[in-house]
Image (cartoon, rainbow, N blue to C red):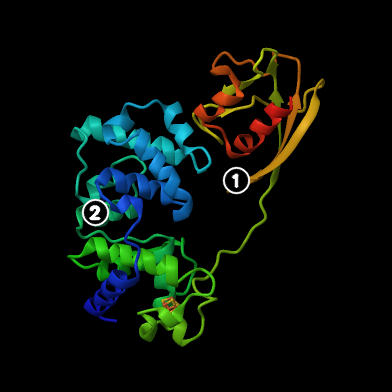
């Protein structure tokens, strides 16, 4: 397929059928694009929108984000998961203030020096914020290109990703980049969906290998699924007998799972004295956690001088960045006590 034909088809389709009212499109400043793109990694648009709006009302500028504490930032992220993204946004804001007085570079290589900004996000900032040449390959573009060009092999492997980026670089135009990039993402998200792609409405159908060969369900090839191990974990629920009831939270270390989030203190094994009050399972990318929460009177468990600890009342919980299972469990547990 010729480049200009492809570009024109994407642009014409985007103008009539693409998304034009996403909150980060109005206005598409580099800061708003950065925040939205980091939030959209691993997360659906509909989930991101309220988080994005809350974030922008608390941290409307790069300067206000750079001045925020890590706890404030984590509290705004709770529920989105993959918390390293939030820490990277804070680092990115501080990096830009320190290195370029808060100005974003518009060069693809320099953009990738910002913490948390990889090749895709750099291309997205160039396209959406600067309306300049910025090739992008994310999950949507991968799926679209694998089907359209009949790319064999598993996306995520170096040989397939190299081919996808080569195509993206070759097909990305030198102008209308904002609309073109939005068109690619919109095609992948709304027509060339993982299941049951809407080929009937697709402007690229006539050139699509997967459509011609009726291999839409086969492409892109999927990774072999592997079973993930299960890990037992034990957490201590210790109360301060005041009214209102307060529970002890401990700030987790800056690396490892749930890094820098506030959590019930974790034990290596079940306490010898304690009442099992609830259990949960939570799936990480590389293991599944089976957690047990133990009510105990022993205030000395898990006291660690290196960790910040606080007793927190129910109405204060929203101010703390909590891992997803505790955000779900703690309010009802505290109401029952
Ligand atoms: Fe995707 Fe179907 Fe369009 Fe091919 S024709 S790009 S499979 S939506």
Label annotation for residue 304 = none
Horizontal side of 51 relative to 60 (left or right) equals right
Mark 2: secondary structure:
helix
Name the residue located 31 percent from the left edge and 69 percent from the top edge: 14
For the residue pair 155 and 299, the one nearer the viewer reads as: 299
Q: CA distance from mark 1 to mark 2?
A: 32 Å
**How far from the left and from the top, in percent, is residue 297?**
76, 15
Horizontal side of 278 relative to 21 (left or right) equals right
Name the mark nearer the viewer: 1 or 2.
Answer: 2
Label annotation for residue 284 = 1
For the residue pair 44 and 118, the one nearer the viewer reads as: 44
Name the residue located 41 percent from the left edge and 71 percent from the top edge: 144
Name the residue located 35 percent from the left edge and 37 percent from the top edge: 57
Q: In the picture shown, does residue 42 fall above or below 73? A: below
Mark 1: secondary structure:
loop
Location of the C terminus by quadrant is top right
Toward which corner of the image does residue 280 lie, by quadrant? top right
Q: In the picture shown, does residue 82 fall above or below 90? A: below
Horizontal side of 103 relative to 318 (left or right) equals left
Q: In the picture shown, does residue 169 fall above or below 310? A: below
Q: Residues within 10 Å of mark 2 (few under 14, many from 20)?
A: many
**How far from the left and from the top, in percent, is residue 130?**
20, 53
Q: Mark 2 = which residue?
A: 126
């Amino acid at each position: 397929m010729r480049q200009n034909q492809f570009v024109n088809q994407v642009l014409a389709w985007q103008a009539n059928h693409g998304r034009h009212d996403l909150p980060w499109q109005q206005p598409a400043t580099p800061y708003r694009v950065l925040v939205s793109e980091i939030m959209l990694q691993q997360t659906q648009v509909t989930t991101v929108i309220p988080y994005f709006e809350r974030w922008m009302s608390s941290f409307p500028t790069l300067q206000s984000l750079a001045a925020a504490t890590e706890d404030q930032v984590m509290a705004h992220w709770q529920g989105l998961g993959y918390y390293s993204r939030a820490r990277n946004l804070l680092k990115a804001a501080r990096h830009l203030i320190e290195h370029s007085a808060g100005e974003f570079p518009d060069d693809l290589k320099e953009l990738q020096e910002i913490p948390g900004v990889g090749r895709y996000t750099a291309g997205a900032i160039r396209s959406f914020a600067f309306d300049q040449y910025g090739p992008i390959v994310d999950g949507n573009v991968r799926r679209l290109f694998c089907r359209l060009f009949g790319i064999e092999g598993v996306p995520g492997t170096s040989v397939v990703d190299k081919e996808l980026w080569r195509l993206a670089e070759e097909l990305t135009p030198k102008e209308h980049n904002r609309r073109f990039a939005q068109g690619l993402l919109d095609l992948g998200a709304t027509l060339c969906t993982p299941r049951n792609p809407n080929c009937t409405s697709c402007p690229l159908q006539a050139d699509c290998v997967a459509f011609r060969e009726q291999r839409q369900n086969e492409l892109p090839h999927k990774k072999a699924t592997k079973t993930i191990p299960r890990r037992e974990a034990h957490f201590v629920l210790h109360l301060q007998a005041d009214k209102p009831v307060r529970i002890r939270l401990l700030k987790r270390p800056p690396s490892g799972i749930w890094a820098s989030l506030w959590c019930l203190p974790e034990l290596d094994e079940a306490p010898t004295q304690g009442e099992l009050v609830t259990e949960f399972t939570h799936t990480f990318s590389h293991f599944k956690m089976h957690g047990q929460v133990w009510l105990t009177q022993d205030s000395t468990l898990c006291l660690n001088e290196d960790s910040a600890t606080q007793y927190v009342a129910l109405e204060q919980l929203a101010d703390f960045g909590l891992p997803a299972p505790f955000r779900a469990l703690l309010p009802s547990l505290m109401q029952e006590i």
